[in-house]
Amino acid sequence: MLNPKLHVREIQKKHKNEFAGWFKECIRTANNAKQSIHAELGMIAEDSTGSIGAQTKMSQNYDNWERLVEAVLQREQYWQMAHDHSRSPSISSTSSDFRSSFNLSSSTDNVPADIWRAEGSSLYELNYQQGTAYFKDVQLNKNKIFFKNFIPNLVFLGGNIRAFEVGDILRSPSEVLGTGTFGTTYKVTLDDGTTIALKKLKETSTEQRKFEQQMKVFRSLKHKNVAAPKAYYFSRNMKLVIHDYQIQGSVSELLHGNIAKKLPKWETRLRIAIGAARGIAYIHTKLDGKLVHGNIKASNTFLNSQQYGCVSEFGLGEVAVAVEPFLMHNAGYLAPECTVNGKLSQASDVYSFGVLLLELITGMSPIEGIGVNKVPMVTWVIHTVKDKGYLFVLNKLAPSSSLNANVEKEDMLLVAMSCLAENPKYRPDMTNVLQRVENIPNWKKYI
Ligand SMILES: Nc1ncnc2c1ncn2[C@@H]1O[C@H](COP(=O)(O)OP(=O)(O)OP(=O)(O)O)[C@@H](O)[C@H]1O
């Protein structure tokens, strides 16, 4: 593999428009080719077990697709980028990070801004506004620069994930983790052992531009309590969203997946609450304070590497198949007004967070029935706190032998109850909720 440190600035200066035009054309042609072959092949067909991996036919399809894209590109002579340059590009072996800026007009959508070698990989990154696409090879031949094996498929959104291709996913073993509101999630183990969570969205007619805009929003989210997607794939027939696989499982599994019904330590639950509150409060500050998570629940909350909660699976309502909030798989978490006006909001996020707090305090699922009438836990708590007070509820659902934990659970129940106000106007905003949740623990007692 050649060292791709190319002295292209001179070329780029002289031929900026030519490069930009080339890339635009290249992406357009490749996308057209990709779409027509997808239409023919129908890409990923799930087999009866729901597995999407190790399908010879599929990898053949992918090879065909790759060959077609390459053929189209070659035919159109888009490979040849630097013809007729008066100065030949040279190869340097002194670069430590391989970066070679093309700095094409990055203000235009779909026009790449940078190309460099993907760390620890044989792929070459091409960055453009919506994310990062990959080439397999870059070659120099005399005064010509060749970009080989254009891979216009997966777009990476930053973060520490190694570059791979849709073909890698198709060839890798996968298992279904579950099917939710927006699609089916698979755990895929890549050939080097890396695991990813891949969500195949239900059929949607979302325009590519809208989809990519939402991905751009995801790309702008950088917070340790927010598990944002790492890559996506968009074609007419298939939309994939890729996250890191969360090895510790979701908070739902931690609370309810244990056969022995052993709850995580109270201290862990405190950290989950604080982390999730930080993540949601951060999301609420984005897009001029207009971004809504829209799907807060225990199965979308995970533990980050510091063992604090982090929230995932947000904003998919914007790009996935249109789902009325009350048809979402979020029974028990949905704010009452959403069942009437069908609109998710930051206030409805606050309500859902209040439900998550109750779940952490009691260890019960929000819809688990209480008493002979099997009243759902959240409804029971809301009514019983009003009738009989906080201590009665805690003694019944969350008894604890430690005085400190009792005090903290009571504080958390107070915060939860304010989030669960029936009228959204009376719910605190997430910044306020965060402050209160952060003040609950008496950390000295845990040292
Ligand atoms: N990144 C991930 N790592 C590990 N498990 C995950 C990951 N993403 C989702 N899961 C798990 O996969 C299962 C299915 O998730 P999915 O998001 O498709 O549905 P859901 O959470 O039940 O509902 P919704 O679509 O409304 O979020 C859930 O148990 C979820 O906790």
Image (cartoon, helix red, strand yellow):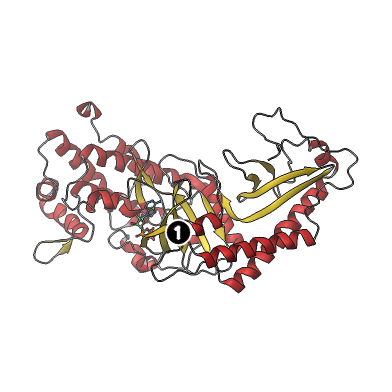
Residue drawn at (21%, 40%), measured in percent from left and top?
265
Question: Mark 1 belongs to which amino acid?
Answer: Lys
Tell me: residue 340, above or below residue 413: below
Residue drawn at (58%, 71%), measured in percent from left and top?
41
Quarter of image, res 295: bottom left
Quarter of image, res 152: bottom right
Residue drawn at (56%, 53%), measured in percent from left and top?
165
Instruction: Classify the position of the N terminus by image quarter.
Output: top right
Viewer-proximal residue, 135 or 263?
135
Tell me: residue 396, above or below residue 56: above
Instruction: For residue 297, say whether it is visible.
Output: no
Mark 1, residue position: 199
Quarter of image, res 271: top left
Instruction: Measuring from the top left, give residue 164's x and y in whole percent.
Output: 55, 50
Left/right of residue 178 with respect to residue 386 in the rendered view: right
Q: Is mark 1 within 8 Å of ligand 1?
A: yes
Disc 1 on helix, strand or loop?
strand
User: Which residue appears farthest toward the front when viewing the image?
Assistant: 56
